[in-house]
Image (tube, helix red, strand yellow):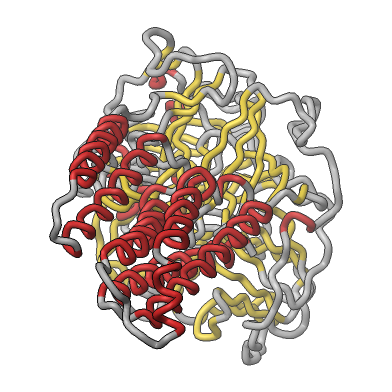
Amino acid sequence: MTANLITFDLVALVLTAAAWIAAGATAASRLALPAAGLTALGLLLTVARIALTVLLGTDGGWWFVQEKVVLELPLQVVTAAAAAVLSAPRLIRPALARGTLEGEPAPVAVPLFTAGYAAAAGLVVTLLIGYPATAAVALLTLALVVLAGLVTWRLLDTRPRGIRLSAGGVAAVVGVAGVLATFAGAPATDAGGGPAVAYPAAKGASVASLTGPAAPQPGGTVRRYTLDARTATVKLASGRKVSAWTFNGTVPGPPITATQGDLVEVTLHNTDIAAGVTIHWHGYDVPAAEDGAAGLTQDFVAPGKTFVYRFLAEQTGTYWYHTHEDSNEGVQKGLYGSLVVTPRGTTPSPTDLTLPVHTFAGATAVGDHDGVDTRQLAAGSPVRLRVIDTDNVTHRLALAGVPFTLSAVDGNDVHGPGRLTGTALSLAAGGRYDLAFTMPSTSVALLVDDDTSDGLRLVPAGTKAAAAPDTAGWPELDLTSYGTPGTPGTPGAQPLTAASRFDRRFTLVLDRGLSLSGQTKGRDWTINGHAFPDVPTLVVRKGDVVEMTVVNRSLATHPWHLHGHSVWVLSRNGDPVSGSPLKMDTFDVKPGEVWKVAFTADNLGLWMVHCHNLVHASQGMSMNLAYDGVTDPFDMHQMHGD
Ligand code: C2O
Ligand code: CU
């Protein structure tokens, strides 16, 4: 609904600007009847926009209408009222008489044009600035609208008037003030209403010193892996060749597995990835120095160089790893793999399948299988499919031929997962779903984006796969009401609910807009109107209970990802989670949505917070979260491949 209202309002805004400008143009040509009609249309559309803004504000919230309420609509209403008072009376009589406009047309046309400029300015503000419109933006907008009106007057009316000069001077001064205020810049930190924290910290522990332990827990072993980053031509299952960036020559990279309590030790070596490489353990809350965020927790590993990651396998479930230097290009080209940790005392079954979904040159691959991947399984065996979205976009999953449960989300078990049939799952970029079922005596199909030309087929031994059904009409599961209620939060600690006492509350409004400081220096993906590296850093103290509200004002989906912490979802669009407690590390904030999540700041360090559509992240939609007393010796400009 909110997304539709955003679109309707944009359309209404374009029409309003067009109506007023056309009214001005027809009046300037003395065409009384069309000018009168267009004026009426302009007034009508202006009223419609007020109604749409009220609807959008009530449906979505203040973030969706702030710039309209404080700037655009007042400007629009004042200019439209001026047009109604100054222009309309002189149009009505000749219009009724089907005559032409008598006398000087400028005093009639200029107010109409100005109302059009106000609407056009509103469009520019919404598309380029969005939330929040500041005083600087208001001054600049006002100056531009007044100047445009004066220029029009000058063009239409040749007799010089003193008032034009003085009004022009005032507008110029207002505009200059606006420009100066624009360059005042963003604050360095956002304390979320809590006590201020110095950032960058002047003294304290270097993030590089926050390393993992050197030994496994009692009873655990050391899982040693060597990952060699190198370019390679990789042959997918269909025979299609892709020139990839790989770990050990394959895509995906080698699966990393461990049992809870083991020590994972990964030696990363870079052979020839000129851009540099690191490894980030996505969703795995490792100590900060092991997090692999180039430019924040380590320098990228250049060709010929090595870096060793060590962390305890404490969380169980499905995770993944990927490069975090120039991650957009690197992950797309193949620098990723799976990380699966199973509970101690269980033996991983042969029907436990890890399935990273990735797009190579337009083809969807599950693992390295583009096209259909068919596997034989004995009927009656317990099956777990661990699906990982390693792409930049949401994937829709459909499991046909068997009732199943969504037993884990982002590695976290769902409480009381119900049986599902004929229900599709929307998996965020970077997210993971574990699907569990008992293999039936008939074939099963896992479809990605309802495409029957690829995906996975499971067939009982000795049989052939049945044709996959059309799943395009299946409804999507609502995660927030799936499963049975439980207590959100770390067992033993204070539950994390909307009623918790929060030490800090952060609000992140995601949009697309102009930024002169980001990497792109153009229309970037923004957070609270800023693009990386100018987004104020979120600051916390260890132990803080934090609420984060993520608002999507744009018309694209933003899979929101926080390093080093998983979050508990409190609500989506104001509706509290009513099913299983929902713990996630990557949640899809779709257009017009508002998510409230909570976490405890219990992992000292410096962490990235970003959109996992890595195109968006590389174009500004990224920021940092810093703990009090952690210093950073690295160069932040390495982030996103600068
Ligand atoms: Cu998979 Cu910074 O992320
Ligand atoms: Cu995004």
Residue placed most toward the observer, 298 or 478 = 478
Of 354 and 552, the residue lying toward us:
552
399 above or below 603? below
Quarter of the figure with residue 482: bottom right
Q: Is residue 455 above or below residue 139?
A: below
The quadrant where ligand 1 appears is top left
In the picture, measured across the screen, residue 402 lies left or right of residue 224, that is right
Asked whether residue 332 is in view, the answer is: no
- Report the quarter where the N terminus lies: bottom right
Left or right of 284, for residue 511? left
Asked if residue 299 lies left or right of residue 341, the reply is left
Q: List x then y, in percent, for residue 340.
A: 58, 49
Please state the horizontal and vertical placement of residue 323, each as a whole percent of the image.
Answer: 37, 46
Frontmost residue, 111 versus 632:
111
Q: Residue at x 47, y 38 (%)?
A: 609
How many labels were placed on the picture? 0
Residue, far top:
203
Quarter of the image with the C terminus is: top left
Please, is residue 531 above or below residue 337 in the view? above
Residue sitting at 61 percent across and 57 percent down? 56
Toward the viewer: 606 or 112? 112
- Looking at the picture, how far across and down is residue 185, in whole percent? 32, 29
Asked whether, in this view, residue 282 is left or right of residue 83, the answer is right
- Residue drawn at 61 percent across, 70 percent down: 397
**Where, by quadrant of the figure, is residue 148 drawn?**
bottom left
Image spot of residue 615 (x, y percent): 36, 55
- Residue at horizontal 44 percent and vertical 36 percent from the top: 608
Q: Is residue 506 visible?
A: yes
